[in-house]
Amino acid sequence: RGFIEVEDHGLSSSFFPFIVAEKDVCSEIRMLESAIELTETDDVKGGTGKMEVRSQSLDFIHEMGWLLHRSHLKSRLCHLDPNSDLFPFKRFKWLMEFSMDHDWCAVVKKLLDILLDGTVSAGEHPFLKLALTEMSLLHRAVQRNSRRLVELLLRYVPEKVPDELRSELKSLVGGDESFLFRPDVVGPAGLTPLHVAAGRDGSEDVLDALTDDPGKVGVEAWKNARDSTGFTPEDYARLRGQYSYIHLVQKKINGKAVTGHVVLEIPGVLSNCNINQKQNEERTASFQIGGTEMPPIRWPCKLCDQKLAFGNAGRSLLYRPAVLSMVAVAAVCVCVALLFKSSPEVLYVFRPFRWELLDYGCS
């Protein structure tokens, strides 16, 4: 960090800071150039709105420069007094909120690294838990509906942690896990980031990122994490009518289900071969599959079915002559009716048409 003195048209002089940092960090901060480089005509046209944006941008660059300066001094002079001249947490929180409002992933990661190297202090212990709880970074990223920030926080792993913060960091992450941010972290009113995403419209991408965390915590917390009133994120989605959220997470839960498998022992017996034999020589192997002994199958004798069939046939033969006689009588009646039936008489009004009766000529 440094200062450049710039002379204006008057007798006074002003200075602008310049920041030396990683390339991705500088590329994101350079987005403020358009807000800072305002002319007098822009000030008149934009009114107080543009001037306020310009003032906030300059404040961010100044504060960011001082923070990098403190971090650099601490890394060089930490052996003298590790607690001397630490950066106030209140100013650090404002830098973090400003960066998240602009969706700067590289700057947010840089700020987290500085937070965990002991440069920032609030004068209270334990400090790290207080800082993360007060900032609620993952909740803020979900409220902004920024998938990039959510994925960055879920996959963030601290690299260099001083000894004075190592024990506190282990108590926060718990066990052997190294991820600092989890989808089931409890915020105000017992709300987790999953609750916040489930209660908002258009949060499919954020919810997809929350349930795809490296620790696989989001899928489990979807139906188990409860707020202060006892509702789960799935209940929030159902009450809001966000059935697409429910189908999205349920599909992941079904894919995570363990399916059964069968293990077969395949012992192989290779034939004896000499050292000088070729590698492509045929080898014999025995393949055996063990199975449980099947119980003998008992086939029915069908004796009862035969008796039942014969009994039904005997009863049906008693009624067969009567049916045949009735059919014969009916056939005779039909034949007699056809013989005595007279030919039909066709009545017509006009005589039948014949060609020889057709007249011609003028009428």
Image: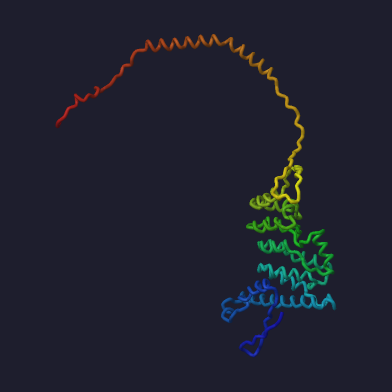
Q: Position of residue 118 (x, y in %)?
A: 80, 71
The residue most toward the left is 362
Task: Depth check: give the residue in front, 321 or 234.
Answer: 321
Q: Position of residue 212 (x, y in %)?
A: 70, 56
**Residue 106 seen in the current view:** yes
| Quarter of the rendering containing residue 186 | bottom right
| Tally of numbered tags | 0
Which x, y percent locates residue 178?
78, 61
In this orientation, which residue lies closer to the viewer: 198 or 291?
291
* Quadrant housing residue 335: top left
In the displayed structure, does residue 162 sit left or right of residue 304? right
> Residue 150, relative to residue 71: is it above or below?
above
Residue at image location 61% in from the left, 88% down from the top:
9
The colouring scheme, among rainbow, by chain, secondary structure or one colour, is: rainbow
Left or right: 171, with 194 as reference point: right
The furthest residue to the front: 276
Figure quadrant of the N terminus? bottom right
- Please indicate, yes or no, whether residue 241 appears anywhere in the rendered image: no
Q: Quadrant of the C terminus?
A: top left
Furthest-bottom residue in this view: 11
Q: Is residue 214 above or below residue 57?
A: above
In the rendered image, which quarter is residue 70 located in? bottom right
Residue lying at 72% horizontally and 64% vertically, measured from the top left: 137
Q: Is residue 240 above or below residue 344?
A: below
